[in-house]
Amino acid sequence: MSGHHPPVSDWATDFDHTDEVWAADPFPIWDELRETCPVAHSDRYGGVWLPTRHDDVSAIAYDTEHFTSRSIIVNEGRPLAEAPVGIAPPISSDPPFHRDARRLLLPAFSPKAIAPLEPFTRAYCHELLDALAGHHVIDAAAEYAQHIPVRVIAKMLGFPEADADQFRGFVQDVLEGVDLPPEERIENFGRLDAYLTAQVQDHVDHPRDDLTSYLLQADIDGQPLEPSHVGGTIALLLIAGIDTTWSAIGASLWHLATHPDDRARLVAEPELVPVAIEELLRAYAPVTMARLVIDDFDYEGCPMRQDDWVLLPFPAANRDPEAFDRADEVIIDRAENRHAAFGLGIHRCAGSNLARMELQVALSAWLEHFPDFSVDDVDRVRWSGGQVRGPRTLPLRIA
Amino acid sequence: MRLTVDPDKCQGHNRCYSLAPELFDVDDYGYAHEIGDGTVPAGFEERARLAAANCPEFAIAIHDDVQTDPAVQGAGE
């Protein structure tokens, strides 16, 4: 968990993206930095930079010559895994290796491959909601949103459904334990590693029609993948798909609970949901990525040093008034929306089609069951900070 | 009107294909390309513009067909 760090004294020179103030409401921080210090710096985590303008976020995302993806989660240590493969390919990989590692995964996540998973996802959402019928207050984050991506990725990977609770623990270790001492963090990773090794071995012994068996049988230029590559990719799929999507579903329900006009409109016009989710993804984009600086390099007057972190806050880019009209407002039927919620450039979220399907199905199913709801107790709502932001406790009162 | 998808810019966000499947298709990897030679059938001009305006990578170019309007014919030459 976060909370091991001293309080932030100044957001331009001492920011910490795991701070509770950031978690609760990062928008004013980003708005002010964009105006006063568009690329902020903090000495924390061994040196980290924070661009907040869309132009800078996209320029750095596109610049694989000066910035490596060798590690993409800012923490106190520096990665042991070497470029260009990194710890969890392809997200941790750089060109040219990145392309092959990514092309292995993309067919499993293309629009046409994801569409057949929709009926299963819809049935599962309705099953969850049926079980909640009659409740007056529902924690939409813990009792609904978080279950959906866990179940879907377990199905895709061919892992036991019963292990879902364990997956959530792994996610917490990787994404929330970022300000723990590196030794403790490495120990936490060991649990995930041991779990994956057992699952992979089970698939080696009993191959079946799922993504894990597919990766075990895959090759790059005729060479089978290294076991560490398969394990790293599976870890990526397990970690990257869960609390990101959970966050997007939860944030969307939070918005609708606090904006009755938007909620009523989506209930009356369910065909608007696909447009609405793009705007909710823009306004509440959960994911901030990170890069490491490859060599000392001057970026727009910022003296970046080798192994400095650079955060890529796509959620801040999405709120830049230079890039979006009325950037600070949620316009539920916004027609033109080039948002960067799934990143920009070669590392565009490989699971974006899956995430969009889950978000759309989860919202539509919720609105069918519960068209009228509000936040039950604002003081109990808790948002995660760090690089994946979304509601972790969201008590909603069902009318 | 014609549209083209720049394959070097497309990263497979899939916004165009979901907004205008009549004008775009995606390959097995999820990367988009224009259907046929990219000619936009009559009545689909707005959809084409909307798809272009939703591409996060600015990968879609719209080429307005000036030849159909005699008043501006030759103006760009």
Image: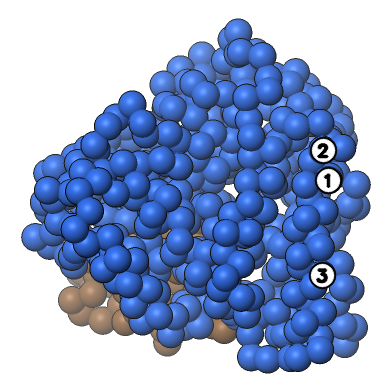
Identify residue for label 2: A184
Residues behind callouts 3 and 1 on a single chain: yes
Position in image of residue A332 (x %, y %): 22, 48
Answer with left or right where residue A244 lies relative to residue A77. left
Q: Secondary structure at mark 3?
A: helix
Does residue A338 sit above or below A106 in this rendering?
above
Chain A pictured colour: blue
Q: Which mark is residue A176?
A: none
Q: Earlier in the sequence, mark 2 or mark 3?
A: 2
Q: Are marks 1 and 2 in contact (CB under 8 Å)?
A: yes
Disc 2 to disc 3, C-alpha distance: 20 Å
**Do the residues indicated by labels 2 and 3 lie within the same chain of the protein?**
yes
Q: Which residue is denoted by mark 1 in the rendering?
A: A187
Residue A378, percent across and down?
A: 29, 30
Rendered location of residue A101, percent (x, y): 76, 70
Q: Viewed as shown, does residue A211 lie left or right of B61? A: right
- Colour assignment, chain B: brown
Which residue is denoted by mark 3 in the rendering? A197
